[in-house]
Image: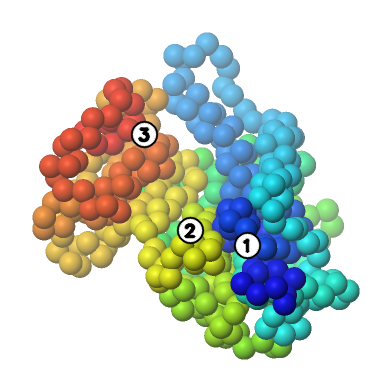
């Protein structure tokens, strides 16, 4: 690295696409700077995954309590929305400071403000401070997409939902992805009347559809309304409520609108026109070393145009790879591992490796277990629990998807077999703690 620049490596953005690798990189003696205009940790830490799972804990508990019924001596549990929000805030408030401390204790410098490229080695922060670096990493993540329709300013995004101090009586959600389904689950469990307006007729299209349809049907039975092919046209304020125009001259009265129509690369006012970085509406183009078309500029995390899932674990892996690359630990291309995914509905749907549809197309062995009748899942009376596994011709587990409250832990347990291609003999040598889910994941029938 050369001393002609202020930093050897400069990261733009303080989310998982940067800090997971920036901190250990600084610990190797590399001069590291991290520019962040908001809270350290980015979306996931402050207004995404962590906040969502904190709010969902009460949902999970009420679901289990209701299933156990008169085994417990209590009246039916309900969620106190404001206290649940306060609990969420107690969880996430300390996190940014902890991340900052990890960075600075390893020797990294945190720079506050919005960065804009002046040239390939120079950024200007908030129009005032000029910072130079040998290498620059763009890790600005995604931002909420907003519908381009009349009245769009009346709708809210995921950050707004995660900070709702009072739960509206009627919530309308536009979208069919993670945010739509997870927030619908939370709001419905807390007592709101939820309507989901879909662009098409498919929900959670990247997940195994038989399991998705089971979750959708369960939500319908709990009072959530789904409108397929809604063709949302406008939002308007009428008296003390809002009106959503959709379909064929139809109107829906509501109290609060969540625009959950997706997330798009956060490239606002980065000055990319001043550097040779190729990008489009899907993100920044990188090669197999996460290098952009400007050779000293790299990208990491959700802002990348990639077939990898836009998930925190993928961003963390990319950030750690760049740490190894910049410290000289490796010169090899990035080699992505199997990255699992999960939607935190109730029950959850989690998956890893090859999809069931791809497995069927390749003529592989597909097996499904009805876990609702397996003794371990009967402990908390799970009504929706099943697992589908894909094995290749040699008996290796190459893919799995599960619907259950315990699906994330089950997939984590099975993940090493997919990533490291355990043989049937190696799997048979795995003896887990009993009775636990880890044991059940390997031995259930």
Task: Identify the secondary structure beneath mark 2.
Answer: helix
The CA span between labels 2 and 3 is: 35 Å
User: From the viewer's perspective, is 429 left or right of 284?
Assistant: left
- Callout 1: SS: loop
In primary-sequence order, the first of circles 2 and 1 is 1
Q: Are discs 2 and 1 less than 8 Å apart at CB?
A: no
Residue 405 on image: x %, y %: 42, 37
Front of the two marks 2 and 1: 1
Secondary structure found at label 3: loop
**3D distance between C-alphas at marks 2 and 1:** 19 Å
Q: Nearer the viewer, residue 168 or 49?
A: 49
Q: Quadrant of the C terminus?
A: top left
Spatial distance from mark 1 to mark 3, Cα to Cα? 53 Å
Residue under circle 3? 383
Give the foreground label among 2 and 3: 2
Looking at the rendered image, the quarter that the N terminus falls into is bottom right
* Extreme residue toward the top, this view: 73
Residue 402 percent coordinates (x, y): 34, 45
Near-viewer residue (285 or 189): 285
Q: Which residue is mark 1?
A: 30
Q: Position of residue 300 (x, y in %)?
A: 56, 67
Q: Which residue is mark 2?
A: 317
Q: For the point 30% across and 60% down, which residue is it? A: 355
- Residue 124 locus on image (x, y percent): 80, 76
In the figure, is residue 63 to the left or right of 404?
right
Residue name at image x 21 percent, y 48 percent: 422
Report the side of 147 relative to 328 (left or right): right
Query: Looking at the picture, does residue 361 appear above or below residue 134?
Result: above
As drawn, the residue found furthest toward the front would be: 3
Q: Is residue 212 visible?
A: no
For the rendered model, the colour scheme is rainbow
């Amino acid at each position: 690295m050369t001393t002609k620049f202020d930093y050897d490596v400069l990261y733009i953005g303080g989310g998982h696409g940067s800090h997971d690798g920036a901190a250990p990189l600084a610990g190797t003696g590399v001069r590291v700077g991290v520019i962040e205009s908001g809270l350290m940790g980015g979306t996931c830490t402050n207004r995404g995954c962590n906040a969502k799972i904190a709010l969902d804990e009460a949902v999970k508990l009420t679901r289990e309590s209701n299933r156990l019924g008169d085994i417990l001596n209590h009246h039916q549990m309900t969620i106190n929305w404001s206290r649940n929000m306060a609990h969420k805030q107690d969880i996430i408030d300390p996190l940014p400071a902890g991340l900052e401390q990890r960075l600075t204790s390893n020797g990294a410098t945190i720079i506050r403000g919005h960065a804009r490229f002046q040239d390939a080695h120079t950024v200007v922060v908030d129009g005032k401070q000029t910072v130079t670096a040998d290498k620059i990493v763009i890790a600005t993540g995604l931002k909420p997409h907003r519908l381009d329709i009349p009245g769009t300013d009346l709708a809210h995004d995921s950050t707004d939902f995660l900070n709702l101090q009072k739960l509206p009586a009627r919530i309308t959600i536009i979208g069919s992805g993670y945010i739509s389904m997870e927030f619908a689950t939370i709001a419905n469990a807390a007592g709101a009347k939820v309507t989901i307006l879909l662009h098409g007729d498919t929900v959670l299209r990247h997940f195994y559809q038989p399991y998705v349809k089971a979750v959708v049907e369960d939500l319908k039975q709990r009072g959530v309304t789904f409108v397929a092919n809604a063709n949302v046209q406008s939002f308007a304020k009428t008296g003390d409520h809002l009106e959503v125009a959709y379909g064929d001259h139809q109107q829906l009265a509501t109290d609060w609108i969540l625009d959950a129509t997706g997330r798009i690369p956060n490239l606002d006012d980065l000055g990319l026109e001043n550097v040779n970085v190729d990008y489009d509406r899907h993100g920044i183009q990188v090669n197999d070393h996460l290098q952009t078309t400007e050779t000293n500029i790299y990208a990491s995390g959700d802002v990348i145009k990639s077939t990898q899932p836009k998930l925190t674990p993928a961003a963390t892996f990319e950030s750690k790879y760049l740490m190894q690359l910049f410290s000289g630990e490796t010169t090899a291309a990035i080699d992505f591992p199997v990255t699992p995914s999960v939607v935190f509905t109730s029950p959850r749907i989690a998956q890893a490796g090859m999809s069931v549809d791809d497995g069927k197309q390749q003529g592989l062995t597909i097996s499904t277990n009805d876990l609702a009748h397996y003794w371990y899942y009967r402990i908390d009376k799970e009504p929706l629990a099943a697992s589908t596994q894909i094995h290749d011709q040699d008996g290796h587990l190459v893919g799995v998807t599960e619907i259950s409250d315990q699906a994330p832990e089950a997939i984590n347990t099975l993940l090493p077999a997919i990533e490291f291609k355990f043989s049937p003999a190696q799997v048979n040598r795995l003896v887990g703690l009993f009775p636990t889910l880890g044991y059940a994941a390997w031995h259930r029938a």
